[in-house]
Image (cartoon, rainbow, N blue to C red):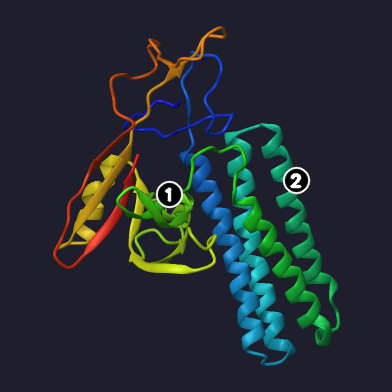
Amino acid sequence: MPSFAEEHYYAMPWGNLKPMCEISCPWEDITPRMRLGNVIDHAGRLLQRFCDKVITRPEGPVYISSCIVDAIRRASTILHFINSSAAASSHSCFHVDFKRTVDQIVRDLCKLKFAIATRHRITEVGVACVSNAAKLLGSLSRDPEMSIPDVVITMNDGEHLLAHAKVRVNEILYVKDAICRGIFTGRLSSVVMKSVSSKGETTAAVLELRMWFGKAHHRGNWERIIEPGRIHYMAEVFENEWCSTIGSRWQASDDRYFCHGKNDVEIRILTAEKKTVTSLVY
């Protein structure tokens, strides 16, 4: 399992499964990956908002043309920034394919901007092209090489699980740059909890939460934002383990890169009279 440290939450190439051998090396800080994914997600949502705006306000070809050209201009600027950032941070096969895909999106959007001569057809062709680009960017925002799990909120009756909900960590990531933050970071949002007994088809409850996911030194900022309420802090602490090829028992590692003697989960609950805010700290 990855080691917990105050400054980093680490990624593992094998996902959330324990390795069958011990690897003596430091783990990757995945904060840059999460920041990049959020920038891509913002670009996709920007394009989708323009499509929704055009569909809900049919005010003629001239208005639609200006909206689509504006959306292409903004998205192209963001995508060029994304590619330059990705090229500087990694040269893996995934990021090479990722860069090619983003370049193709930019080329398709530029062709749309200059190739359509008749404005009466721009509604159908333009909205379809921009909408497809938005969906592709949404899928690219999820890095398959990043192993950090989703935030899971559960409703329990004693030891019995009644309902649960999942929130992507990227959506509540807190960083200083606003464009790299999660879409729901610090915002009051509705989290729908699905019932376990009905295979997730029935809504058991709807929670109104403001959530942050970030490093411990950001606590002061969050506490000032939600005053006079208090924050419910949760932090997972992992311990590196190894297993020999002839045994089945996992043991704590003695490697110098990892910390020992910590529990899997440390929880401290602070409640307020009228306001409860959940924060995940790594």
Residue type at mark 2: give it.
Arg
Residue 241 on image: x %, y %: 43, 18
Q: Quick one: 187 or 204, which is closer to the camera?
A: 204
Q: Locate residue 47 relative to residue 211 in the image: left or right.
A: right
Residue 138: name its quadrant. Answer: bottom right
**Foreground label between 2 and 1:** 1
What residue lies at 69% left-to-right and 73% top-to-bottom?
69
Residue 258 on image: x %, y %: 38, 18
Residue under label 2, please give it: 100
What residue lies at 55% left-to-right and 60% top-to-bottom?
199
Q: Quick one: 99 or 282, which is closer to the camera?
A: 282
Residue 250's place in the image compared with 227, above or below, is above
Residue 148's place in the image compared with 177, above or below, is above
Residue 52 on image: x %, y %: 62, 79
Q: Residues within 10 Å of mark 1 (few under 14, many from 20)?
A: some
Residue under label 1, please give it: 151
Callout 1 secondary element: strand
Q: Residue furthest top?
A: 246
Q: Locate residue 256 relative to residue 130 in the image: left or right.
A: left
Q: Which mark is first along the chain, 1 or 2?
A: 2
Q: Quick one: 106 or 141, which is closer to the camera?
A: 141
Q: Which mark is residue 217?
A: none
